[in-house]
Amino acid sequence: MEVATAVAMRNIDQRTIDTFRVPGIVLMENAGLALLQTLEALWPNLALCHVTILTGAGNNGGDGFILARHLWHRGTDVDVIMLTAAGRLRGDARRAYDMARAYHVPMTSATTPQAWSRTAPVLKHTSLIVDAMLGTGLQRPASGLYAEVIASVNEAPQPTVAVDIPSGLSADHGRVAGPHICATHTVTFALPKRGLLTYPAAAAVGELHIVDIGIPQAAIEAEEIDVAMLQEADIRQLLPQRHPNAHKGSHGHVLVVAGSVGKSGAAVLASQSALRAGAGLVTLAVPAGLNAAMEVQLTEVMTLPVAESPDGCMAASAYDTIEAFWSNASAMIIGPGLGIFPETQQLVQRLLQCAPVPIVLDADGLTLIADQPHILQASQVPLILTPHPGELGRLLKVSPADIQADRLDVALDFVRDTRVHLILKGAHTVIYTPDRHRWINCTGNAAMATAGTGDVLAGLIGALLAQGLSPLQAAQGGVYLHGLAGDQACAGLGSTGLIASDLIQELPHAMHKVRQGVICQIS
Ligand SMILES: NC(=O)C1=CN([C@@H]2O[C@H](COP(=O)(O)OP(=O)(O)OC[C@H]3O[C@@H](n4cnc5c(N)ncnc54)[C@H](O)[C@@H]3O)[C@@H](O)[C@H]2O)[C@@H](O)CC1
Ligand SMILES: [K+]
């Protein structure tokens, strides 16, 4: 599903009005009704509640008037508080107001901070607050009256439903520039907006509901949006199917190049994850001194001891053993726990230039090439890079804070120049393709911020590549299933205490769930 900016959404709305002949007020009516249905599904006793609806000067407020009219018509006790004088409402918002007025919906206005301080006590007696103040038309940070109202709403203990976007947040990015509503639910129209899916703003969205308001798909496609949100249906259709006649050689062999003294666990996690993600065979190339320990720890994974340097890392001469082996492999994972030793740097650079199968480059593998990212262009095979913000910062020569401030766009030039697929990890992971499309993943949770979960992701993506998925499909399936496994593990464990190996156990269940078509909510 496409992810819109404010301009894209305005164009799509306008195209629906102009080309598909749907009047704007009909879209607004659809929006208000979809909002109503969402509230009724969330609170079946809505008719017995008191609902306070705060409306602004634009069409976001218009949606609030439509909702108010329908709630009132159905017997719900409603109070609309307008933050602008009725005389200043224009267009569809004015029409929506006129209809609400004709239905005798109780409406008052509070257009100054003083008037708001007299009106605010109504919040004490309400069951639900609806924020229809500012939507995609936000032009500047909220201040004055709007800032006061936002503060009062955020202090109130009742649930708050944001209409389209929490007031004060930008539709276009995840940066927080001023006061904003912290919603328990956000009901957004037609498409998710960038600001709803990108942190830190995404933390204020609560549970996200994306509702249809009758915009035709052709009106959306004409906008040629290059950012999308991953959905379970996308993943279901790309998961590898196993033929009844399958054998272990028919669904891929992953070669994992990983591990150094003190970091052998990363090699174990990546290898085991690859097996759990369906690879038929997994071979782990490790420094020879670690081989005995790996043999004990890994039962199903095969090992390939390679030359090691005196400090326990992979020596440059390990290349020969790996090269002699790689015709067996269908994908490689390079990097987990490799360390950042100069000898290993030479090895990794050579492997990237010469290896004949698709590669997942992760962790220390990324750090080892950070000074020479042009090396990526010399690769003969598809590359998937899996940096966290610190690793991407090293590749792009910017700070992790700069990466986080611009997660959706920061690596656009890098992927264009290097022709790699890049997975920027973190809450709501972003996949970049070489042709500059981005996909946002919304599975996963904060409990996954623990050592080794990145190694599990690398193993999972490597296994999907080895089973014949394209780099984009492997990246999509990998990040979605990794997050889903984390969500499922948390359902049993709670929000802390998850460790990376729990994810590995959950991977088959996550894949099974997606194959079965169990709907997963995003939050
Ligand atoms: N046909 C359409 O365009 C549809 C629009 N819809 C709704 O319309 C919204 C967009 O409507 P608008 O473009 O009218 O914009 P908004 O309703 O988001 O806000 C625009 C108004 O707020 C004022 N404003 C902007 N920033 C402010 C600030 N910081 N402090 C105080 N006032 C501020 C502007 O001067 C303008 O009067 C969407 O978010 C959605 O809720 C839906 O009804 C669906 C159909
Ligand atoms: K809003």
Image (cartoon, rainbow, N blue to C red):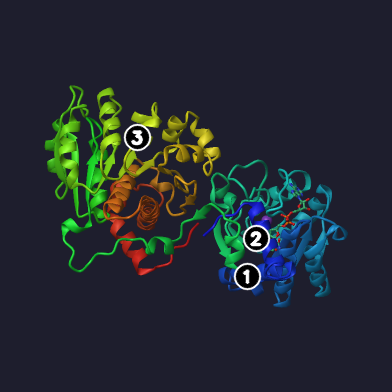
Q: Image point 30% across, 56% down: which residue? A: 506
Dot 3: within a 10 Å radius of its alpha carbon, few (fewer than 14), some, or many (20 or more) residues?
some
Depth check, front residue: 91 or 359: 359
Mark 2 or 1 closer to N-term?
A: 2
Looking at the rendered image, the disc whose residue lies closer to the viewer, 2 or 3, is 3
Looking at the rendered image, the disc whose residue lies closer to the viewer, 3 or 1, is 3
Image coordinates of residue 520 in percent, x first then y, are 44, 63
Image coordinates of residue 229 in percent, x first then y, are 50, 55
Q: What is the number of the mark on residue 378?
A: 3
Q: CA distance from mark 2 to mark 3?
A: 41 Å
Which residue is identified by label 1?
Answer: 214
Number of numbered discs present?
3
Badge 2 amino acid:
Ile
The secondary structure type at the circle numbered 3 is helix
Q: In the image, ligand 1 is in what quadrant? A: bottom right
The secondary structure type at the circle numbered 2 is helix
Report the side of 42 relative to 357 (left or right).
right
Q: Image point 76% across, 54% down: which residue? A: 120
Report the side of 445 relative to 404 (left or right).
left
Badge 3 amino acid:
Ala
Task: Residue 215: tell me if it is visible.
Answer: yes
Q: CA distance from mark 2 to mark 1?
A: 11 Å
Badge 1 amino acid:
Gly
Image coordinates of residue 383 in percent, x first then y, are 35, 42
Task: Residue 166: tell me if it is visible.
Answer: no
Which residue is identified by label 2?
Answer: 12
